Image (cartoon, rainbow, N blue to C red):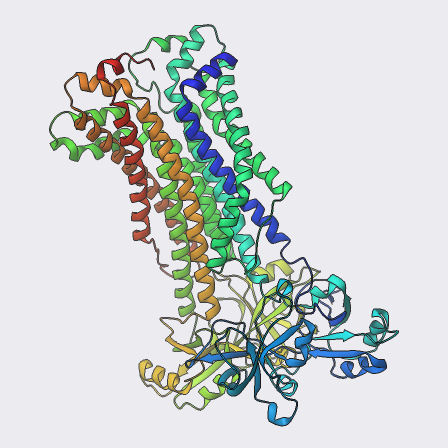
Amino acid sequence: MIWATLSSARERWASFAGTFVVLCLSVSLISAVALTIAAGSRADVGEPRRYADAPVVVAPDRTAAFDEEPVSGLTTGTIPEDLVDRLREGGTEAVADREGYAQLVVDGDPDDGPAPLARPWSAARLSPYELVDGDAPGRDADSRRDIVVAAGTGLSPGADVRVLTARGSEPFTVTGTYRAARTASAPRETPVFVSDSAAERLAPGVHAIGVYPGPGVDAGAVAEVVRGAEGGAALEVLTGDERKRAEPNPDADLLGGMMSMLGMMALITTFVAVFVIASTFAFSAAQRRREFALLRALGATPRQVSAVLFTEALAVAVTASGAGAVLGKPVADQVVRLMRSVGIAPDGFSVDYHPVALAVAFCAGFAVALLGVWAAARRTRRIRPLEALREAAVDPKAMTLGRWFFGLAFAAGSVGIAYIAVTIPGDGAIPMTMLLSMSVIVAVALLGPVVVPPVGRLLTAPMGRLPGAEAMLIRENMVAGVRRTASLAAPVVVTVGLCGSMLGLVGSATAAEAKAEGEQTPADLTVVSAAAPGLPAAAAGRLREVDGVRATPMYSVDVLAGTGGQGKLVDATVVGDDALPHAVDPPMLAGSLADLGSDMVAVGELDRTGSGRDVGDPYPVRLPDGTTITPEIGAVVAEGITPGRTYLPRSLVSGHTDNALVSQINVEITDGSAPAEAERRIAAALDGFGASVRQTSKPAQTAQQQENDRMTLMFGSMLLGLAVLCSCLAIANTLLMSTSERRRDFATLQLAGAHRGQVLRMVALEAVCVVALGALLGLAATGGVLLALRSALSRFTADPPIVLPWEPMAGIIAVCLLLALVASLVPARLVMRTRPVELAGVRE
């Protein structure tokens, strides 16, 4: 049997080469994803950057006790002011670091480039930063408007600029420009530096203290002084690499989103790889049916025939998986470069070879190949020796019992997944819909042979007007070779079905969320920042001076909420004590927002279920400065598409957070004027704040929402691009294998009187019909997925819109068609260079 395997490999090297390429590409993508995930998991580990030059750093403890359990979370503020003076005793230097909101205004709009962060110039030495040009901010009262900006911003000393702060738009004068003294360990942030007195005004709290111990003073002595401090958050004294814990990580959210998206990429890439490899092996086994029957006639047992396929798959798996794992690093470099260019990955993020990641990719490729050949090997065991004598290439039975079983099993599983997606609370419908798309695609591909004959006749009906017997030949080829046709169409099914489902999922969920937000906003107009992370609090004050409107500012504050050590970071919405009903109007499950007292909190359905508490029960919340409060649950809100709704009255968080930015301002028109007129007055009042005003029926997106949508679109495009690339190679491979194996058919047609152009035209039309069949099945799978998604989204908004971008879908189908034509016509043209008489005698 080894001789038979080697002989078959020599005769069918082209098909093995195609399978090798598809598996190698799939493994390289899996390897690239694994290497990127490994690099991302270590991205926040390393040397300190912001406080690289400070030997000791005093900072709030991020693992302070919460609900009687140690919980790691966000603690941003503040250190007692007098601790700085106490640390300066005995020759020790202590530098207070503060951070406040400050965003440069360029051409009248907030600059969306550098991070909107202001720090005192005295803290520049902690990194360290150094002056490139000009002077540092002064220390006298006249220097409160001095500012130092990063080199390369286009500003030079002496320039007058306006800076958007929490107090509004303020004038400053550039006194100098700076750069990082050590480029290799430069902080991944670009703040502006102001005088210490201006920093106290812009950022009232001390966020960290850099300590340079004097003679005879060590970290233990510093800790003794810190333990004697009263008030503020729980503090810790950090040295060495531990100092990194005191630094804000501007890339944390980006890395978290990237890791989640890479997980989806790994799942989809593996799914596509298993699908296309399985269809390729199935097609190869169907082509070689007479060969296996001949082996059976020569005395080979069914187990030995199956061993031939497994041996071939093993050889391909080892070589392709090894090559793909090695190529993973170059592929990962290109993927990361693309991710950095579109803002999905942090600047400076890179990948290195990681043995565990490479081993995982190799094993994944090995498993994919064996799983792909398993079904084909099972079918070869049922081949009878007499089939070696057949002359007609007709599939004896396209739908086997096993294919019926697994096809119906996946169909039933799809129904179950759809039910879960429709009933699961929160945003669980989104990942379940992604899983549903894969299940439906597999079910459609397995049951595809059932619809090949009727669809084939339908697709070839318009060709009946063509001269000659081309339409009849194409139709009979599709009907007689049902399994071959279904295998050729399978890569198109996964490409169109997966792309349609993912594009429709993102578009429909985004549109439904915007519609639900508009329905649940009682205001007439919404105001958000067009480029900055929020609006200054002064913007809300400015709106209160506009006649005929009522403005309700909404703040976004990160808090830890939960019970029993299960605290989680929550983006809570904070509104004035009596203003919550004017801000939001979500579906209520218990209680009322109108009755929410100043010592109460409104939580989402998932929070109530997870904590086991209901209306009237205490609900511990740890505020940004480390203070833990225990308000009473006053209302329970139904979850939206984005889960985790938590509403707090402003009096509970006042004085416990330094976030003075307004995330959104809802405006009610009280004088009966037209929305367009009120919108004009509001825009005039907020001139210079970088505000975006929209009617509630067309809700405005915050800068963060716009960035999230952009990142989702970019990553989705990249993800689908990789999947399409893998699938398109499978399309080209299967059609190349099919066309190369039809040499005798082409010779017979030519000997019967058909000229070369007629044969090529028939091959092209067959490729068009195969792609059309795959596209129809893929669109049918997409339709089923989007119908289930619509039912799931109807829980959040009535009549949710279903969005399927037809232009990208048409482009994807066009690419599949182009590849199919090239992969069919080129080998057919090469084959027919040999005389028909010689081709007619070629053995299979």
Q: Nearer the viewer, residue 696 or 344?
A: 344
Residue 567 as seen in the image, left or right of residue 409: right
Q: Position of residue 675 (x, y in %)?
A: 33, 80
Whether residue 666 is situated above or below residue 768 in the rendered picture = below
Say which residue appears at 83% left-offset and 82% top-offset.
89
Q: How many marks?
A: 0
Quarter of the rendering occupied by the C terminus: top left
Q: Residue furthest top?
A: 298
Residue at figure coordinates x 73%, y 61% from the top left: 241
Q: Is residue 839 above or below residue 152?
A: above
Q: Position of residue 120 (x, y in %)?
A: 64, 81
The residue that appears at 22% across and 27% down in the rendered structure is 475
Q: Is residue 67 above or below residue 813?
A: below
Q: Residue furthest front?
A: 133
Q: Nearer the viewer, residue 572 or 93?
A: 93
Whether residue 618 appears in this view of the structure is no
Where residue 216 sits, quadrant-wise, is bottom right
